[in-house]
Image: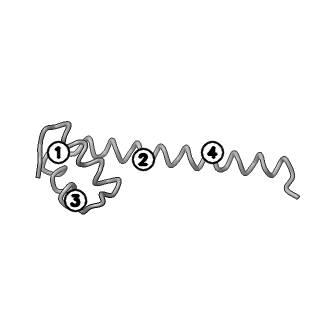
Amino acid sequence: MVSVRMLKTRMKRLAVRGDRAMQRLAEVEAAITNLSNEDLLDLADIFKAEPRSPIGHFAFVEMERRDISL
């Protein structure tokens, strides 16, 4: 049987892992937002396949915000 202490430790570890994943995701979004228009179009071209990957989705959302297209 799993002790309460082990369960709390595991829950904390999973929470930290989730927090780190959310931080990395925010950093990826920020990096895409900070791209120049030319670089953003290059990224969107690389990830234009359907169904779109998360990076492709971020790129196309940013292109829409900037009112540019491939």
Tell me where residue 51 appears, x and y as whole percent. Answer: 30, 60
**Element type at marker 4?**
helix
Tell me where residue 22 appears, x and y as whole percent. Answer: 48, 44
From the viewer's perspective, tell me whether residue 23 is left or right of residue 37. right
- Which dot marks residue 15? 4
Cβ atoms under marks 2 and 4 closer than 8 Å: no
| Rendered residue at 85%/47% (across/down) | 4
**Element type at marker 3?**
loop
Instruction: Classify the position of the N terminus by image quarter.
Output: bottom right
Q: Which amino acid, by three-letter code, is at mark 1? A: Ser
Cβ atoms under marks 1 and 3 closer than 8 Å: no
Q: CA distance from mark 4 to mark 3?
A: 33 Å
Front tag of 2 and 3: 3
Report the front residue among 10 and 68. 68
Q: CA distance from mark 2 to mark 4?
A: 15 Å
| Rendered residue at 19%/40% (across/down) | 64
Q: Crowding near pointer 3: few (<14 within 10 Å), some, many (20+)?
A: some
**Element type at marker 1?**
loop
Tell me where residue 54 appears, x and y as whole percent. Answer: 35, 53
Q: Which amino acid, by three-letter code, is at mark 3? A: Lys
Q: CA distance from mark 2 to mark 1?
A: 19 Å
Q: CA distance from mark 4 to mark 1?
A: 34 Å
Read off the residue under disc 3. Answer: 48
Q: Earlier in the sequence, mark 2 or mark 3?
A: 2
Q: Earlier in the sequence, mark 2 or mark 4?
A: 4
Read off the residue under disc 2. Answer: 25
From the viewer's perspective, tell me whether residue 16 is left or right of residue 30. right
**Element type at marker 2?**
helix
Q: Which amino acid, by three-letter code, is at mark 4? A: Ala
Front tag of 1 and 3: 3
